[in-house]
Image (spheres, grey):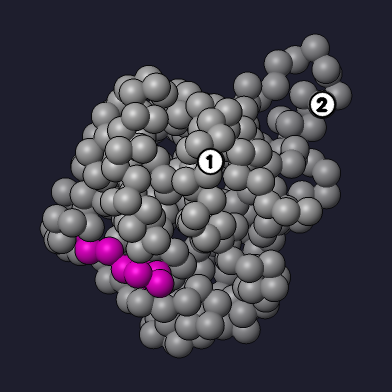
Amino acid sequence: MPFDTADWYDRAATRDLVGHSALHVEWAAGVAADDDVVGLLDRLPRERRQPSLIFSVATWLGAEATDYPAFRAWLVEHWPAVEAVARERRTQTNEVGRCAPLVVALARIPGPLALLEVGAAAGLCAIPERYAYRFGERPVLGAGEPLIDCVVEGADLVPDSLPDIRWQLGLDLHPLSVADAADTGWLEALVPLDRSDRRARLRAALATARDDPPRVIAGDALHDLADAAAQAPADLTLVVVSLGTLVYLPPEARAAFPVAVAEAGARLVTLEQSGIADRPQGRVSAGRFVLALDGEAIAEASPHGDRLTALSVRRSAARHPGLPDAHP
């Protein structure tokens, strides 16, 4: 069946971007019903038509938070520039909110730890121990900036302390630098214009990271994993981390990734859509995000890490259909 760009944007408007950005939902719905704009998008390779990428490129080039008709007019006028940048850039969202589920998973691994993040961008999620966390009503963990909030359903998920991380490395096809203004500008453009909360959190994380920039090297998540892992000190427990990265790998590379992690002698923490890196066995709805350790699902999660629901809570809700869904 031929790929349909309009369907992709319709799915983004009705599912993928819901709860992520009301502005991007409106833009995606408008594009889905706009044959002329879809025709422009179809000039790009399939992977370059991604809604979040196109909207981020537009933001990068100066588009404002307007309704769809105004956005459409801007997009058509600036299409040559949008097309050129979309062919060069890629989504490299450094959403530090995902560090909340990450520290939940890391608490289950005996330390001290070495952390290797694939798809690390500027490495902001490779330094989770330098931020602070508030899990519901529990006391704040850590003293750094930003303070990351996470609603938790399931008391056994909340860690008592931050992980003891003594070495970290990021791996990315095109590393970004927290010291480079163009790179940090692109990271900001990846945050929807109507999400000032996430933009402020990103800026706080960048300020923290600049004090001691995380090291990110160029490399492929699968093919360069072994060489990167070999750099970790042997006396530390190596943990490979993927936070929304594996979905961009071809299916065969995605299937080979856990094997490569095991061959490197590492543990694996993933925050990915259900079925990509975990064994949900029907416990999590398709398309939902799952926090998993070594392929075993720990909790259902929101895509950006601000909500975690233990699978035991999900099973209880399923047995009592009168209860509201944990993630409306």
Residue appearing at x 59%, y 51% in the figure: 272
- Which SS type dominates the magenta stretch? loop
What is the x, y in percent for residue 49? Answer: 50, 50
Q: Which residue is mark 2?
A: 318
Nearest the eye: 197 or 235? 197
Screen quadrant of the C terminus: top right
Query: Quick check: can you spot residue 98?
Result: no
Tell me: 261 left or right of 276: left
For the residues bearing labels 1 and 2, Cβ distance under 8 angstroms: no
Residue appearing at x 47%, y 24% in the figure: 26
Q: Is 76 within the magenta?
A: no
> What is the count of numbered marks?
2
What is the x, y in percent for residue 48? Answer: 48, 56
What is the x, y in percent for residue 145? Answer: 23, 42
Residue interval drawn in magenta: 169-178
Nearest the eye: 41 or 316? 41
What is the x, y in percent for residue 216? Answer: 31, 71
Q: Secondary structure at mark 2?
A: helix
Does 62 appear above or below 118?
above
Single out the mark in the foreground, 1 or 2: 1
Nearest the eye: 201 or 139? 201
Does 39 appear above or below 194?
below
In the picture, the disc for residue 38 is 1
